[in-house]
């Protein structure tokens, strides 16, 4: 009986593994540009869309997720880039990718978004948002 349970457990582990995850590598990226005015005025619970652009080193790179850290009303935003590692058919040219960053809050106030533009020496593209 113990062996059957062990075999079933091992089988469940094998079928739950996603082999595609082994084909990706992740790294932090930096924003090239942020398409937003220096100051944005919005209302509570309203989505504010900010179009951001970042670069990848080859055609296998794509957006994975935003990495956010908040300190009061200031949020520092970086991004994680996903590279397909198992496909040799990627273009070798660097590319630019745009992605929408959505800001939404239910609290009025002044907010600062700091989009990290360089991984080695922290430089930021600053967007100020006033929520009324």
Image (spheres, rainbow, N blue to C red):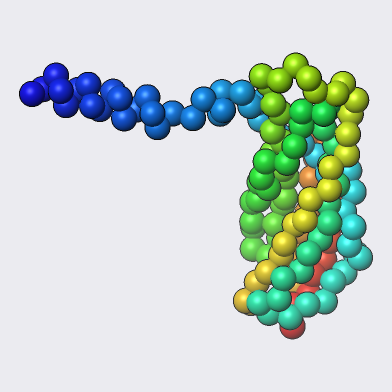
Residue 17 lies, with reference to residue 33, above or below; the image says above
Describe residue 113's horizontal placement relative to residue 91 as left or right. left
Q: Quadrant of residue 80?
A: top right
Q: Nearer the viewer, residue 60 or 104?
A: 60
Q: Is residue 107 visible?
A: yes
Residue 56 lies, with reference to residue 91, above or below; the image says below
Q: Quadrant of residue 14?
A: top left
Residue found at the far bottom of this picture: 132
Q: Position of residue 18 (x, y in %)?
A: 49, 30
Q: Residue at x 51, y 25 (%)?
A: 19
Q: Is residue 120 visible?
A: no
Q: Residue at x 78, y 77 (%)?
A: 42
Q: Residue at x 64, y 56 (%)?
A: 70
Q: Nearer the viewer, residue 76 or 16?
A: 16
Residue 101 lies, with reference to residue 24, above or below; the image says below
Q: Quadrant of residue 43?
A: bottom right
Looking at the rendered image, the quarter that the C terminus falls into is bottom right
Q: Nearer the viewer, residue 43 or 130?
A: 43
Q: Residue at x 72, y 52 (%)?
A: 76
Q: How many marks?
A: 0
Q: Position of residue 75 (x, y in %)?
A: 70, 57
Q: Nearer the viewer, residue 81 or 72?
A: 81
Looking at the rendered image, the quarter that the N terminus falls into is top left
Q: Position of residue 8 (x, y in %)?
A: 23, 27
Residue found at the far top of this picture: 88
Q: Position of residue 47 (x, y in %)?
A: 72, 71
């Amino acid at each position: 009986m113990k062996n059957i349970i062990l075999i079933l457990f091992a089988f469940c582990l094998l079928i739950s593994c996603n082999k595609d995850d082994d084909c990706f590598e992740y790294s932090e990226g930096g924003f090239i540009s942020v398409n937003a005015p220096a100051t944005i005025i919005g209302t509570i619970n309203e989505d504010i869309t900010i179009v951001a652009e970042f670069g990848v080193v080859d055609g296998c790179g794509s957006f994975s997720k935003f990495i956010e850290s908040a300190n009061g009303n200031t949020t520092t935003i970086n991004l994680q880039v996903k590279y397909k590692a198992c496909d040799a058919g990627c273009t070798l040219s660097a590319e630019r990718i745009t992605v929408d960053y959505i800001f939404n809050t239910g609290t009025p106030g002044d907010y600062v978004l700091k989009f990290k533009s360089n991984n080695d020496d922290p430089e930021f593209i600053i967007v100020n948002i006033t929520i009324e």
